[in-house]
Amino acid sequence: MSRRDRVSEKKRRPAETFAGLLAILLILCFALPADADYRVRRKTPSHVVDAAINRNPPIMGENTIRIEIRDAGGRILTGARVSVNYYMPPMPGMVPMNYTIPAAPDGSGYTAKMNFIMTGPWNIVIRVESGGSPWRVTFPIDVR
């Protein structure tokens, strides 16, 4: 191999390396699954609430929320009355958008279907009544 061939071979290596790394990066981006759910965890002094919305980000139209509630000891709370209140913060000149739906027991948690009629900021309030004492957790979302 002549000196000229060795020099041109060295010049190609960085370009080939870059192309190889780019190909690996693209494969990883498409091969790794994205987290399909929008997940939120809220804590109270006596409970932990995990909520998952089946779209990430939540979209205009129907979205399913799944709620799991655990007590301070980590035991799943069943038999509670759970409702989901979702509303868009008040805006001047707009009709209030405020909806409350019951969450049905589903396995170790609760599920409900929310129908967002508009894109933008919304607040979700999960209300729980268990053992005669009501409590709630709140979190904001951005519907697209």
Image (cartoon, rainbow, N blue to C red):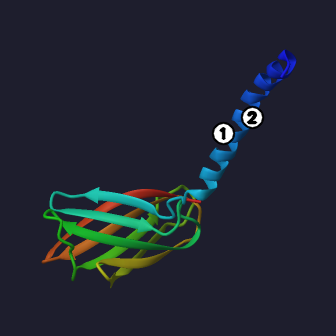
Q: Amino acid at mark 1?
A: Leu
Q: Amino acid at mark 2?
A: Glu
Label 2 residue SS? helix
Mark 1 surroundings within 10 Å by alpha-carbon count, few (fewer than 14), some (14 through 19), many (20 or more): few
Q: Quadrant of residue 138?
A: bottom left
Viewer-nearest residue: 28 or 72: 28
Residue 44 in picture, x, y percent from top left: 21, 58
Viewer-nearest residue: 2 or 54: 2
Give the position of the N terminus as an image quadrant: top right
Closer to the eye: label 1 or 2? 2
Residue 109 in picture, x, y percent from top left: 31, 77
Tell me how many marks there are: 2
Residue 136 in picture, x, y percent from top left: 26, 65
Q: Is residue 11 left or right of residue 130?
A: right
Give the position of the C terminus as an image quadrant: bottom right
Residue that appears at 45% across and 65% down: 87
> Can you identify the residue that label 1 sits on?
21
Residue 72 in picture, x, y percent from top left: 15, 62
Viewer-nearest residue: 8 or 56: 8
Residue that appears at 13% across and 77% down: 132
Q: Quadrant of residue 45?
A: bottom left
Residue furthest top in the image? 3
User: What numbered label is drawn on residue 106?
Assistant: none
Q: Is residue 19 left or right of residue 129?
A: right
> Can you identify the residue that label 2 sits on?
16
Q: Is residue 118 left or right of residue 101?
A: right
Residue that appears at 76% across and 23% down: 10
Label 1 residue SS? helix
Viewer-nearest residue: 107 or 64: 107
Residue that appears at 38% across and 78% down: 111
Q: Earlier in the sequence, mark 1 or mark 2?
A: 2
